[in-house]
Image (tube, rainbow, N blue to C red):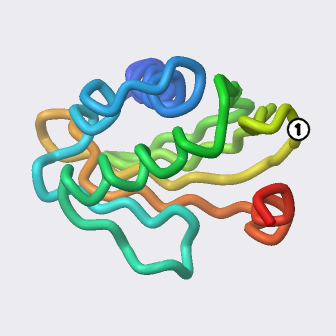
Amino acid sequence: MKEAEARQIIEAYFHAAMKEPDIRVFTAFFAPDGVLEDPVGTPPLRGREAIASFLEAGKSKLGPSEIVVREIITCGSESAVRWSGDLLTKRGERLNIEGIGVFTFDEQNKLRHVREFYDVAKLLAIFS
């Protein structure tokens, strides 16, 4: 996979997750048996149904938010992505957060595995 192609998919992925959350569009980025670890260290979500439940839970706490891809490095079927986010809670609080994601694609350019690394404590603090 070329870096430009990976960037296009990953930016659309973040848009569907955060800017204009759309569960159907978001889960379609994944292979049917795709895995999401968000964040790494939590139990992996396996399959589109589990991933859809995760996004639905996030939608209940966050308003339209934005993730910007800052840097991407693609090697073979994997991309490492440095991103930053401007999150808005349903209570009107803002949070700036940065992270790194590792995206693994299958032969159809569907996400086989996504691993997200970020400061979980910072994120959880606005939900307590």
The mark tally for this picture is 1
Residue bearing the label numbered 1: 93
Where does the N terminus fall, quadrant-wise?
top left
User: Residue 33 versus residue 125: which sits nearer the camera?
Assistant: 125
Helix, strand or loop at mark 1: loop
Q: Indicate whether 44 appears above or below 32.
A: below
- The part of the image, by quadrant, that contains residue 45 is bottom left
In the displayed structure image, the side of residue 34 where residue 120 appears, left or right = right
Q: Amino acid at mark 1?
A: Glu
Q: Determine the residue positioned at 37% across, 73% down.
A: 44
- Specify few, some or many for label 1: CA neighbours under 10 Å numbering under 14, 14-19, or 20 or more: few
- The part of the image, by quadrant, that contains residue 68 is top right
Q: Picture coordinates of residue 53 (x, y %)?
A: 33, 53
Q: Determine the residue positioned at 78% across, 33% down.
A: 88
Q: Determine the residue positioned at 19% across, 53% down.
A: 49
Q: Indicate whether 23 appears above or below 107.
A: above
In the displayed structure image, the side of residue 9 where residue 97 appears, left or right = right
Q: Picture coordinates of residue 126 (x, y %)?
A: 84, 56
**Residue 3 visible in the snapshot:** no
User: Residue 26 versus residue 78: which sits nearer the camera?
Assistant: 26
Q: Picture coordinates of residue 100 (x, y %)?
A: 66, 53
Where does the C terminus fall, quadrant-wise?
bottom right
Q: Picture coordinates of residue 64 (x, y %)?
A: 65, 23
- The part of the image, by quadrant, that contains residue 30 is top left
Q: Indicate whether 20 appears above or below 122.
A: above
Q: Determine the residue positioned at 65% across, 63% down.
A: 117
In the displayed structure image, the side of residue 117 where residue 102 appears, left or right = left
**Residue 58 visible in the snapshot:** yes
In the displayed structure image, the side of residue 52 where residue 101 appears, left or right = right
